[in-house]
Image (cartoon, helix red, strand yellow):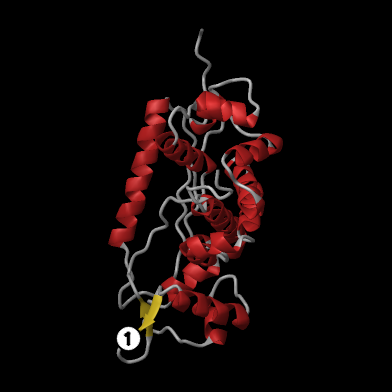
Amino acid sequence: MSSRAAVDVFRHRDYRVFLREYYSQRKERKAGYSLRAFSQTAGLRSPNYLKLVMDGERNLTPEMALRFANSCDLSGEAADYFCELVAYNQAQSAAERERHYRQLRRFRRFRRVHKLDVAQEAYHSHWYIPVIRELVARPDFQEDAKWIAKTLLPPISPTNARDAIGVLCDLGLLVRDTGGRLVQAEPLIETPEGPLGHQVVEFHRAMMGLASEALDRVSRDEREISSVTLCLSKAKMNELKKELEELREDLLQRYQADEQSERVVQVNLQMFPLSAARRTEP
């Protein structure tokens, strides 16, 4: 049997998907291969344990992850990557997920395959990078690091402003028009759902922190920060969530930058539970 898996583990960011693909391909190529056969190789008592893991009904401990890696013909860096991927997928917090993601980035083959991850990571690495992208749409925008740095609230350093422009240009989010002026490549961009949720979480965390600071830093006539507390059914919660998503889409379409644009503003839409769900009677 080959020491290298037929299914390339480095192309996966979800170890359960890798296991499903590996098992499916193995079953096609070897007559009689089954869940029981995998369990025997891994030294598992339950013949259905692999299925439970693939279906998300069981997690893997570090010791079990290594056994699964060996049973999938992974060795060396491939086995190390699989074990780190398990830890990444099963992380319970954004900070823990970020820590394991940085371990995944150590693998050269991962970086080569997932180049777009680097772009998304760079865009959300600092709160001011998306802000500067919007700032470029102002008619009076100056491609000067000092002007950008002092225009943002709170201000940043000219070095950070210069680096942010570089990131936006490298990602193709900012381009130059026929006159050589920096402009947005596209008027609207949205962050898609994807594996780098921890990066987006940290971005939201930073923006909520700025919102908290704005209570003291920004006058009332220039901000709108309010809240409402509701008691809702699960159905109503889903309805409200959908309405907020539609509102966000509407805001993106209705309030695009134009020739009269003056300020970059942040609009946070948040909904989260403040009590546990009602217990259902058995």
- x and y percentages locating residue 73 in the rendered image: 58, 43
Quadrant where the N terminus sits is top right
Relative depth, front residue between 185 and 205: 185
Picture residue at 37% right of the left edge, 88% below the top: 181
Label 1: element kind: loop
Picture residue at 50% right of the left edge, 79% below the top: 165
- x and y percentages locating residue 275 in the rendered image: 56, 28
Question: Can residue 250 be seen in this snapshot?
Answer: yes
Question: Can residue 275 be seen in this snapshot?
Answer: no
Outermost right residue: 63
Picture residue at 43% right of the left edge, 27% below the top: 232
Relative depth, front residue between 143 and 80: 80
* Res. 185 image quadrant: bottom left
Relative depth, front residue between 260 and 199: 199
Number of marks drawn: 1
- x and y percentages locating residue 153 in the rendered image: 56, 71
Residue at the disc numbered 1: 177
Which residue type carries mark 1? Answer: Asp
Q: Is 225 situated left or right of 92 in this image? A: left
- x and y percentages locating residue 217 in the rendered image: 60, 64
Picture residue at 61% right of the left edge, 31% below the top: 41
